Image (tube, grey):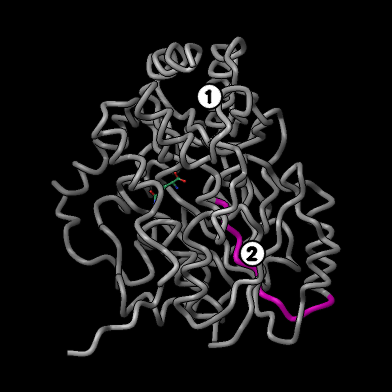
Amino acid sequence: MSVIPDKLPFVGTTIFTTMSALATETGAINLGQGFPDFSMSPVLTDLVCQAMRDQHNQYAPMAGWLPLREAIAEKIDFLYGARVNPATEITITPGGTYAIYTALTCLLQPGDEVIVFEPAYDSYIPNIVVNGAKPVLIPLTDQFRIPWQQVTAAITERTRAIIINSPHNPTGTILHDDDIAALQQLIQDHPLYIISDEVYEHLVFDQQPHRSILAHPVLRARAFVCFSFGKTYHCTGWKIGYAVAPPALSSLFRKLHQFNCFSCHTPVQVALATYLQHREAYLELGKTMQAKRDYFLSLLQNSRFDFLHSGGSYFICARYHRIHDGNDAAFAEWLTRQHGVATIPLSAFYQQKTDSKLIRFCFAKADSTLELAAKKLCAV
Ligand code: GLN
């Protein structure tokens, strides 16, 4: 038998899996992988049980349960003032990561180029490479903003797409009005598509709005915008999300989706269609998570970590130079083993594993978890 060539020779097991396994092995508090450790709404779990009892247990339509797509369209209109057709522009997916992968797979031909900003969520580059395309890596600025002049300079006739992520994983930065204006200019000047990862759309802090690509007709016309119910309703293990794209792009997307996942978990979709009517559940999320960010920071104000600003997401990054002079991966391992707190080293978000001397904390945790972790971290 010949050896099967590895399509992703430059990657191993994801850092989230690795750090969660290390946390389990060592009994450390897991502030690494991004997931809440508090309970989700019992109203929503009851709705899923009810949907099962009501015999919603067979395949949902390929593009998703229509009342759910209708409820999403209503939400998008309410939040972003965009009229999206639920029949032709919304596809329910098994999570945001799948939506991003499918969008890239329908856009890319071998040799195409995709602009990616680093640090980048760890699935983007493998998703591009597996399609025979090339990631064109542009470092974010010191403040983790997009250097738009560099973007323009990086465009070639092979550039097919640009990946945008706000709120940003891992840094917690958000897009501002000038970023949206720069992206609009770029799209007008070049025939590019946008993949917009907006899975943390409701986790925006400090009274800032979430600047969705969907709010801008020029951008929306060229975009796949990807969302996650797991992040919104504290159920990351449900693996359910959706992609919004114009009809022609959604139709390409569904061609792939029908031969991959085909359709998503029916009872969960039926339940979400009802639960989406409870607007307060997502409207209050930013405030709740901001309070967690602030509580975590207050507990750590006398620690030797230096925190960067987080304007959104589950995450906040910190420098550890006053504690350790090793690289970030070594530091994260040391912190887990010696002090019982697991985090994510930012080098995992760079293709070359660039040592950023930064680690990422997930603060989407019960106050008691944050207190326990902070006690250990203050002793470092
Ligand atoms: N999105 C989550 C994070 O950034 C992890 C998801 C995963 O483990 N693949 O922590």
Percent position of residue 343, x then y: 45, 34
The amino acid at mark 2 is Val
Q: Give the magenta-colored segment's residue range.
A: 189-198
The residue lying at 30 percent from left, 38 percent from top is 22
Q: Position of residue 211 (x, y in %)?
A: 70, 48
Bin the neighbour count of mark 2 within 10 Å (Cα to Cα): few under 14, some 14-19, many 20 and up: many
Q: Residue at x 66, y 50 (%)?
A: 80
Q: Which of labels 2 and 1 is toward the front?
A: 2
Q: Residue placed at 81% from the left, 64% from the top? A: 150
- Is 370 above or below relative to 329? above
Where is residue 45 shown, x and y percent of the image? 26, 37
Up/down of 5 relative to 28, above or below:
below
Secondary structure under the numbered disc 2 in the rendered image: strand
Q: Is mark 2 within 8 Å of ligand 1?
A: no
**Of label 2 and label 1, which has the lower sequence position?**
2
Which image quarter holds the N terminus?
bottom left
Q: Residue at x 53, y 24 (%)?
A: 288
Against 102, residue 298 (above or below) is above
Indicate which disc residue 288 carries: 1
Residue of label 2: 116
Q: Residues within 10 Å of mark 1 (few under 14, many from 20)?
A: few
Label of residue 137 in the image: none
* Amino acid at the residue labelled 1: Thr
Residue 377, percent from left and from top? 48, 17
SS label for mark 1: helix
Residue 283 is left or right of residue 54, and the answer is right
Determine contact: label 2, label 1, CB under 8 Å.
no
How far is disc 2 from disc 1 in space, using C-alphas?
Answer: 31 Å
Judged left or right of residue 282, residue 95 is left
Q: Which quadrant of the structure image shows residue 248? A: bottom right
Quadrant of the image occupied by residue 276: top left
